[in-house]
């Protein structure tokens, strides 16, 4: 029963985190179709269709990272480009708010029970559903440039 409550609490947290990332989108939005990868620009808040993902937030994060690290190659070690990142697809979560490692530490130990694993050596906060619940998480890759779709 306790495991079920923890799992439900985690799902609720994951859906809230996903909603927060979409709530920060601003217009115009770059929307990418999930199957065809075609882009369209929406001038309406929350203007992406259900068949699309919004790349606006990831675009801003990547642009900021290029300014911070000085090149696309160096920035890509910390923030994936919008077409590569798993965050806009809703299949990655960063547990580092506000720069607090306790939650991420707990998830690194127990995430495998829910199919969630830390994937990058350089990002203690980044988790993805890469295994079936209860399986062993794969070995960490050095950084986001090793991310495989
Ligand atoms: Zn992340």
Image (cartoon, rainbow, N blue to C red):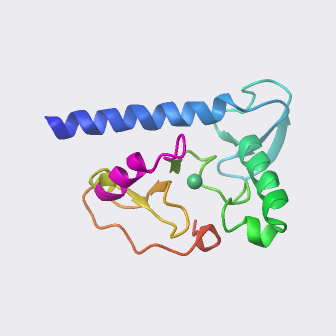
Rendered view: 128 above or below 5: below
Lateral position of residue 83 relative to residue 18, left or right: right
Total tally of numbered discs in the picture:
0
Where is residue 58? Give x, y as percent.
72, 48
Which one is nearer the viewer's eye here, 37 or 16? 16
For ligand 1, the image quadrant comes to bottom right
Where is residue 34? Give x, y as percent.
65, 48
Q: Residue at x 44, y 61 (%)?
A: 118
Res 22 quadrant in image: top right
Lateral position of residue 72 relative to residue 20, left or right: right
Where is residue 91? Give x, y as percent.
52, 50
Name the residue at the left extreme.
1
Res 143 quadrant in image: bottom right
Rendered view: 104 above or below 53: below
Q: Which quarter of the image is occupied by the N terminus?
A: top left
Lateral position of residue 84 relative to residue 19, left or right: right
Q: Which quarter of the image is occupied by the C terminus?
A: bottom right
Rendered view: 9 above or below 62: above
Where is residue 2? Give x, y as percent.
16, 36
Which one is nearer the viewer's eye here, 38 or 18? 18
Rendered view: 20 above or below 109: above
Q: Which residue is drawn at 21% across and 37% down?
A: 4
Lateral position of residue 71 relative to residue 21, left or right: right
Q: Give the range drawn in magenta.
A: 95-109
Which one is nearer the viewer's eye here, 77 or 50? 77
Res 132 quadrant in image: bottom left
Asked if the stretch drawn in magenta spans residue 106, the answer is yes
Dominant secondary structure of the residues highlighted in magenta in the image? helix
Q: Which residue is drawn at 30% across and 58% down?
A: 109
Asked if the stretch drawn in magenta spans residue 4, the answer is no
Q: Which residue is drawn at 48% across and 47% down?
A: 95
């Amino acid at each position: 029963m306790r495991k079920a409550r923890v799992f439900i609490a985690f799902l609720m947290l994951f859906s809230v985190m996903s909603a927060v990332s979409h709530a920060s989108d601003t217009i115009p939005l770059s929307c990418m179709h999930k199957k065809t990868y075609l882009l369209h620009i929406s001038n309406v808040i929350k203007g992406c269709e259900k068949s699309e993902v919004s790349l606006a937030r990831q675009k801003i994060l990547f642009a900021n990272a290029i300014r911070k690290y000085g090149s696309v190659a160096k920035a890509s070690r910390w923030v994936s480009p919008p077409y590569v990142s798993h965050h806009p697809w809703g299949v990655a979560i960063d547990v580092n708010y506000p720069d607090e490692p306790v939650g991420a530490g707990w998830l690194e130990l127990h995430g495998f029970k829910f199919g969630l694993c830390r994937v990058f050596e350089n990002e203690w906060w980044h988790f993805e559903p890469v295994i079936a619940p209860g399986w062993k998480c794969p070995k960490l890759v050095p950084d986001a440039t090793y991310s495989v779709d």
